[in-house]
C-alpha cells in the first residue's frame, strides 16, 4: 500500500521540544494545512466548512527507529516506567503515523497556495507531512464514558506562568495565547525537576527561555533568532 503525502503543516514549533504533547492540550496552538499542488482542488473541500473539527493523519517525520521496540517510556510516567507501544501515543511505532483532532477555524484561499485550512489545537512540528484529513463526527467519535488507561491516574501538572510585561508586546495576541497554553502544560520531560535549570525552545521566530520551581514557571526571555 502506498501512502501519499497530501500536504504539510505550518506551525509555531520548529523543533520537537516545546510542541504540545497531544492535540487540543494547547487549544490556541495554530496550524495551517497547505496542500501539495496535486490536491489543491477546491472541490475536494466541498462541504468541509460544515464541520467544526477534523481528524488529521500525519507523519512523525523526526522520530525514526531502526527496529521495532514493543515497549516505550511515556514522559508523563517519569521516563522510567515502560508500557506497551500500542498502549501509548509514542512517536516510535511500527509505522510513524500520528492522529490528531484539530479545530477547523476556517477554509481560506491563499494567493500562493490556493485553498488552505486554518486549524487550532495543533501538536505538530513545523513542516509535518499530512497524509489525510477526515471530518470529526461527534455522534460517532465522541465517547464520554471512555477510560484513559494510565493517563487517568496522572496528577494535575498545570503550571502557573509568570511572564515579563515586555514579552506580550513582542508577540501577536495569537502567538502569546499559544505560548501561555504551551508553558502552563509544562513542556519539560517529567523526570527533570531542577529549579535552577534554564530550559529553552524555539517558538515561531523566537527562542523562549524559562525556569520551573514547583508549580511556578517563570519566563526569563523571549528573543528573536
Image: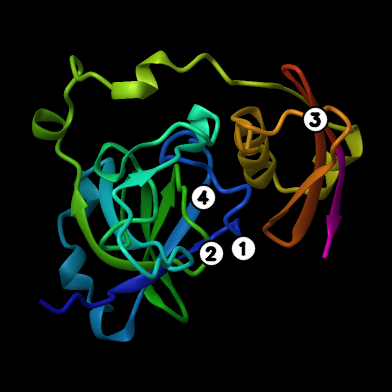
Label 1: element kind: loop
Q: Do callouts 2 and 3 mark residues in contact (Cβ within 8 Å)?
A: no
Mark 4 closeness class: few <14, some 14–19, many ≥20 residues within 10 Å? many
CA gap between label 4 and label 1 equals 13 Å
Report the quarter where the N terminus lies. bottom left
Residue position marked by numbered label 3 in the rendering: 194
Q: Quadrant of residue 59?
A: bottom left
CA gap between label 4 and label 2 equals 11 Å
* Rendered location of residue 187, percent (x, y): 63, 38
Query: Camera-side residue: 76 or 156?
Result: 76
Q: Is residue 193 left or right of residue 47?
A: right
Residue position marked by numbered label 1 in the rendering: 14
Q: Is residue 187 left or right of residue 127?
A: right
Regarding residue 102, the answer to whether it shows in the image is no
Q: Do callouts 4 and 2 mark residues in contact (Cβ within 8 Å)?
A: no
Residue position marked by numbered label 4 in the rendering: 30
Mark 3 closeness class: few <14, some 14–19, many ≥20 residues within 10 Å? few
CA gap between label 3 and label 4 equals 30 Å
Amino acid at each position: 500500500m502506498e501512502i501519499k503525502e497530501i500536504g504539510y503543516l505550518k506551525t509555531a514549533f520548529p523543533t520537537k521540544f516545546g510542541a504540545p504533547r497531544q492535540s487540543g492540550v494547547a487549544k490556541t496552538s495554530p496550524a495551517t494545512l497547505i496542500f501539495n499542488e496535486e490536491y489543491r482542488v477546491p472541490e475536494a473541500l466541498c462541504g468541509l466548512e460544515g464541520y467544526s473539527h477534523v481528524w488529521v493523519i500525519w507523519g512523525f517525520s523526526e522520530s525514526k527507529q531502526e527496529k521495532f521496540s514493543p515497549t516505550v517510556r511515556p514522559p508523563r510516567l517519569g521516563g522510567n516506567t515502560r508500557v506497551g507501544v500500542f498502549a501509548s501515543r509514542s512517536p516510535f511505532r511500527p509505522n510513524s503515523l500520528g492522529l490528531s483532532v484539530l479545530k477547523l477555524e476556517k477554509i481560506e484561499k491563499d494567493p500562493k497556495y490556493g485553498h488552505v485550512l486554518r486549524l487550532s489545537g495543533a501538536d505538530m512540528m513545523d513542516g509535518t507531512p499530512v497524509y489525510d484529513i477526515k471530518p470529526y463526527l461527534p455522534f460517532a467519535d465522541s465517547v464520554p464514558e471512555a477510560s484513559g488507561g494510565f493517563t487517568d491516574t496522572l496528577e494535575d501538572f498545570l503550571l502557573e506562568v509568570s511572564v515579563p510585561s515586555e514579552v506580550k508586546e513582542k508577540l501577536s495576541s495569537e502567538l502569546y495565547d499559544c505560548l501561555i497554553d504551551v508553558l502552563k502544560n509544562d513542556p519539560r520531560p517529567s523526570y527533570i525537576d531542577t529549579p535552577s535549570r534554564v530550559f529553552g525552545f524555539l517558538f515561531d521566530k523566537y527562542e523562549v527561555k524559562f525556569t520551573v520551581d514547583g508549580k511556578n514557571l517563570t519566563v526569563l526571555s523571549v528573543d528573536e533568532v
